[in-house]
Image (cartoon, grey):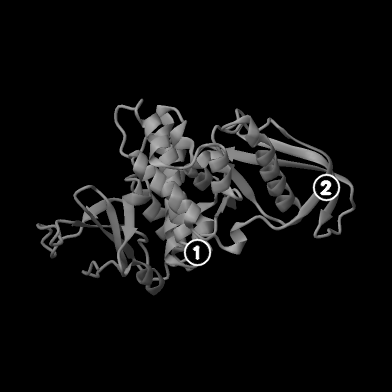
Amino acid sequence: MQLVVSCDYLISPAFCAPEELTACVESLIQIKRSIENNLNNIVIEENALEKLAELGCYPCAQIFNHNLQSISECTYTGRDIARTVNNILALELEEECRFPVHVADWTNKKADPELIGRAPSRSPALLDMLESISLSTIFFKKNYSVLHHPTCGGNTVTFSGELASLLPETQDTLPQNILAVVSVLPDYDAFALGQDAKTLFDQATDTQSILSSFYAGALAILNQRQIKNSKFNFDSFEFGPHFVDSLDENQCGPGQNFSGPLFDSICHVLVKLEKNEVSPFYTDTTRKTQRKRANGDLAWRTHITKGNPALRLLFWTDAEEKIILANVGKKNDLEIL
């Protein structure tokens, strides 16, 4: 699944309600990260910067600072937000992160409900975006959701119309009636929750896609437990330099024998709802002194499997409780990397 980001969402921190601002900004940060790490799950509305300039909403610090004045406390400044948005717009998207090229003629077309943009002039562009999504879904086997602000009341939009002709040509008989239901999401986390996190892990081919699958899995656990207002985000954890290699060495990598228990254990640890007991990793068998790095990070261990082999997850926590996943090891190993 890919996430289509509308122009309106790119400038949402300039107009959103105070209680929405943090989620909007963090969504933009996660979008930037996804593009930088070539996850190929983000599509930006075409000609976004030109469309924003035409609206008089060029993403500069001033436009965001105006809204921040009504918020007593905010982690981000207008300059921070503007830099993030402009970085997104400057990043080069892979070909697969663009809509398939097509030319369509319609007898009629409409969206129900109509997406509301920053100005009435946005309506034709938003309808065109929904058209591209619908045709890509029906004829090009794509799967999209939309990140837009403000969202519609029912969280979905139905695009329908009578398609008279289409290029490139399709084997389907035309004209025909088209109908597609498109999800409209409020933030990036809603997109992550809509994915099968374990499948993402099994299909992961690099470090960043593994990290993203853990993030989605941890969010799913919070959602299942109905835990809200969590401080968990992409910055809550990272991989140590030996972590990914240790997965393969212990048959815990994507699609390997112990990938399921490993994935479940890590996702619980990340949101501090441990699947198995988490214990300090001691310096020796006397269990008196917890291992500590020179910078003060503390060492921990927890079960992945209890049988043969008995595998353990080893990780560090820093002073701000950030988790650094160190390595997977066997029960009697006395090494945290």
Q: Residue at x 71, y 51 (%)?
A: 137
Q: Nearer the viewer, mark 2 or mark 1?
A: 2
Vertical relation: 19 (above or below) 38: above
Q: Residue at x 59, y 48 (%)?
A: 45
Q: Amino acid at mark 1?
A: Ala
Choose the circle earlier in sequence order: 2 or 1.
Answer: 2
Within the image, what quadrant is residue 126 found in?
A: top right
Vertical relation: 282 (above or below) 83: below
Vertical relation: 41 (above or below) 246: above
Between 228 and 158, the one nearer to me in the picture: 158
Q: Residues within 10 Å of mark 1 (few under 14, many from 20)?
A: some
Q: Judging from the image, what secondary structure is the residue with disc 2 in?
A: strand
Q: Amino acid at mark 2?
A: Asp
Q: Which residue is mark 2?
A: 105
Between 189 and 71, the one nearer to me in the picture: 71
Q: Judging from the image, what secondary structure is the residue with disc 1 in?
A: loop
Q: Residues within 10 Å of mark 2 (few under 14, many from 20)?
A: few
Q: Give the CA distance from mark 2 to mark 1.
A: 39 Å
Q: How many marks?
A: 2
In the rendered structure, the answer to whether residue 157 lies left or right of residue 260 reads right
Between 330 and 55, the one nearer to me in the picture: 55
Q: Where's residue 163, x and y in %? A: 84, 45
In the rendered structure, the answer to whether residue 337 lies left or right of residue 216 reads left
Q: Visible in this render: residue 217?
A: no
Q: Visible in this render: residue 118?
A: yes
Q: Where's residue 295, x and y in %? A: 14, 59
Q: Which residue is mark 1?
A: 204
